[in-house]
Image (cartoon, rainbow, N blue to C red):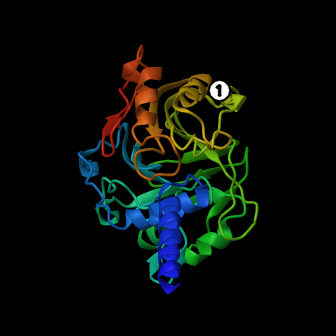
């Protein structure tokens, strides 16, 4: 009798373990990946930018990882969605839980130049990373509506909260930078609360030049309306996490289409290769992106984390 019970228990444990190890239930799959991630090494990027060598008379940028891009915009240093933590997610004391990065940032926080402007697109953990914000200050921080309460946890008390269509002119010793928040298609809740928060893309203008940073977005025809702000030398577009989240994240082909709609000359593909946030293979977004631009490969500004691009002077 006892032997039968033990065998039955072992059998149930085995079936349960097999289920946990193979099920595609999204919550269990997420927890399973968190456990497996603990044993995985984080790769080093193959390229390392040298911002100290960048000209202040040009637009030069480097993709540092995920949606984090370092930009020298004619002498003004801009950083988008800075995320340098090993994991993205809520903090439980000294432990941060959530997806673990696959590749290290191309620069550490200490290797960054002094930042003039930080742009935060929305409240999700892979875009507002409080540990990163605590370690690197900036003269100006711009963020979406209803996110100031989050930033207070990083001792940021006076950010600029912008809603769609609102703009601000930021001054510096070498001239002004005008930034406009634009509407995109995404969402802004931050677990575990149910507060509906804002989510932005941004248009950055300086020296009669313009950069479009799309943040996170699903496909929308809105980008064709942003031509009214002028021509874009470069567009920073998200290309990953679309399967199955197509209602909130565009495909690589849609990212190209939206950049085309806005009239962007060059495109920086971001939001891929760094964190496993969806079901598509990690290398699929950049492959599809390159395929979408196979007749215009010169428009692809970067393909690898750490790669640097300077907009050709025309």
At 43% from the left edge and 22% from the top edge, which residue is drawn?
Answer: 291
Total numbered badges shown on the rendered structure: 1
Label 1: state its secondary structure: helix
Question: Quick one: quadrant of the C terminus?
Answer: top left
In terms of depth relative to the viewer, which is nearer, 277 or 159? 277
- In the image, residue 306 above or below residue 293: below
- Residue 27 image-quadrant placement: bottom right
Which residue does the image show at 67% across and 25% down from the upper left? 224
Left or right of 191 in this view: 13: left
Task: Say which residue appears at 56% left-offset and 62% top-offset.
Answer: 28
In this image, 89 relative to 63: left or right?
right
| Residue 87 x %, y % | 44, 65
Instruction: Name the spot of residue 230 as percent of width and height, x first.
Output: 61, 28
Q: Which residue is mark 1?
A: 227
Q: What x and y, as percent, mark residue 203?
A: 59, 40
Q: Nearer the viewer, residue 267 or 242?
A: 242
Foreground residue among 48 and 91: 91
Q: Is residue 98 visible?
A: no
Relative height, residue 302 to residue 147 (above, below): above
Identify the residue at horizontal 37%, vertical 21% (top origin).
298
**Residue found farthest to the front:** 1
Query: What residue occupies the far top of the structure in this picture?
Result: 295
Q: Residues within 10 Å of mark 1 (few under 14, many from 20)?
A: some
Looking at the image, can residue 289 be seen? yes
């Amino acid at each position: 009798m006892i032997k039968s019970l033990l065998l039955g228990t072992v059998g149930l444990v085995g079936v349960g373990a097999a289920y946990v190890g193979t099920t595609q239930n999204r919550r269990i799959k997420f927890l399973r990946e968190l456990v497996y991630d603990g044993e995985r090494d984080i790769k080093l990027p193959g390229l390392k930018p040298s911002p100290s060598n960048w000209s202040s008379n040009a637009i030069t940028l480097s993709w540092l990882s995920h949606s984090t891009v370092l930009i020298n915009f004619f002498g003004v240093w801009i950083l988008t969605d800075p995320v340098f933590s090993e994991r993205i997610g809520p903090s439980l004391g000294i432990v941060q839980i959530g997806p673990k990065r696959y590749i290290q940032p191309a620069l550490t926080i200490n290797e960054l130049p002094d930042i003039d402007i930080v742009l935060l697109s929305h409240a999700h953990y892979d875009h507002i990373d409080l540990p990163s914000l605590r370690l690197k200050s900036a003269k100006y921080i711009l963020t979406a509506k209803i996110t100031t309460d989050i930033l207070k946890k990083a001792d940021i008390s006076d950010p600029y909260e912008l809603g769609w269509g609102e703009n601000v002119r930021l001054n510096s010793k070498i001239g002004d930078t005008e930034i406009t928040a634009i509407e995109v298609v995404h969402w802004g809740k931050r677990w575990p609360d149910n507060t509906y928060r804002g989510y932005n893309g941004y248009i950055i203008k300086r020296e009669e030049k313009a950069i479009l940073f799309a943040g996170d977005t699903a496909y929308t025809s809105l980008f064709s309306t942003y031509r009214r702000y002028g021509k874009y030398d470069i567009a920073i577009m998200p290309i990953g996490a679309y399967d199955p989240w197509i209602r909130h994240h565009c495909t690589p082909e849609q990212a190209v289409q939206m950049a085309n709609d806005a009239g962007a000359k060059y495109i920086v593909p971001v939001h891929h290769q760094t964190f496993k946030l969806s079901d598509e293979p990690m290398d699929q977004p950049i492959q599809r992106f390159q395929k979408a631009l196979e007749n215009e490969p010169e428009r692809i500004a970067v393909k690898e984390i750490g790669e640097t691009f300077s907009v050709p002077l025309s």
